[in-house]
Amino acid sequence: MKKIIVSFQGVLDEKNYECALTFTDILEGQDIEIDFVFLAWKNSKDYFLKSDKIKIIYLEDPSSVKTYDNKWYINLNRQIRSNDFLLDYSRNRYEYIVKMRSDIKLINKTKFKNELLKAIDIPKIWVLNTPTSSPRLLTPISLKDHISDWFFGGTFERLNECLQLEEIDEYSLLDETPYKYKNFIFWRRHQNEQLIWKKPWATEEFIEPLSRQWQKRNINNSMVYANYLYRNFYLSSPLKIGLNSNSKPLSFFSWYLNTYSIINLNIIETFLLNKGMLRLLVFYPPVFRYLIYTLKITFSRNKYLRF
């Protein structure tokens, strides 16, 4: 019997706990055993807990710092600490590990079950296409190695190889003065979607200037990134595999109305990537999304997408 662990990490509150409960009993009748854990911080309130199907594990909160515009917490060390704990907890106990944001909920049991059974036999890390940046040429900005941190799955060996498990001084990611580039404004040196993975840490000076989060758009850079994604990741679209977000609801209309979607892989691009059709992916034209992006940037009062 194959053993799998499914973990949820984030704020432990009633809404997120209800999201986690939607995943229990997803593989009834299968020759697979699944344990569910919720990685919470020790100061969490848990008066609403009502099921023994999800084990709550309380970790020491490393806390976080806000960007200088006081808008968002960095929250990188919280992700790294929970990832490190999960791998240590799962070593030699589980053959496959799944971790996701605590606000993700299951909306179609059959779709998710089928994709999970498929993913566990693929020797790559399973991630979502949201918010994974696309390697295509037709994009307003080419974010480097920007791979979704909403959800991932894989064996202990693959995750241990690819995840960054050492914490950092989060202040080193900040600059008091943001960097503006075209229609983008950056308040931090790297995004969590980049820094939870080991690849950006490979060089000695991994905390680079703000302007190094993206790369020049050309065929060579796009193909290098596309090959990196194809070799290491298997991607799925949340709605297509029966998932949604409680805090950031996904739908056909929200996808096209969200200005950030122009940067990410869509369902067609995800298909091309998983099939290894990398040249088609690099030259894929997201015409409708680009039109909406252009109109919104042109007529919006706020001309900048914030990172």
Image (cartoon, helix red, strand yellow):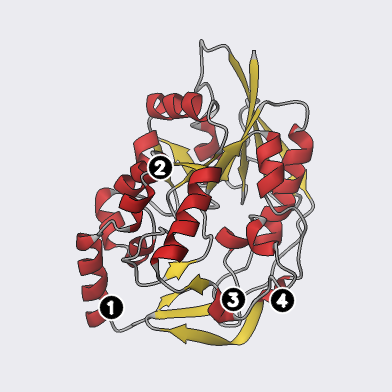
Mark 3 or mark 4: which comes first in sequence? Answer: 4
Residue drawn where x is 54% and y is 85% of the image: 178
Tell me the distance, in whole angstroms, between the alpha carbons under discs 3 and 4. Answer: 9 Å
Mark 1 or mark 4: which comes first in sequence? Answer: 4
Image quadrant assignment for residue 72: bottom right
As displayed, is residue 218 above or below residue 261? below
Mark 4 or mark 2: which comes first in sequence? Answer: 4
As displayed, is residue 28 above or below residue 198? above
Mark 2 or mark 1: which comes first in sequence? Answer: 2
Residue drawn where x is 59% and y is 70% of the image: 190
Q: Residue furthest bottom?
A: 177
- Front in this rendered view, residue 229 or 253: 229
Kind of residue at disc 1: Ile
Q: Which of the labelled discs sits on residue 40, or is there none?
A: none
- Front in this rendered view, residue 18 or 238: 238
Q: Which of the labelled discs sits on residue 171, or is there none?
A: 4
Residue drawn where x is 40% and y is 69% of the image: 218
Mark 1 or mark 3: which comes first in sequence? Answer: 3
Tell whether label 2 touches label 3 (CB within 8 Å): no
Secondary structure found at label 4: helix
Residue under label 3: 188
Q: Is residue 277 left or right of residue 151?
A: left
Secondary structure found at label 3: strand
Residue drawn where x is 43% and y is 47% of the image: 245
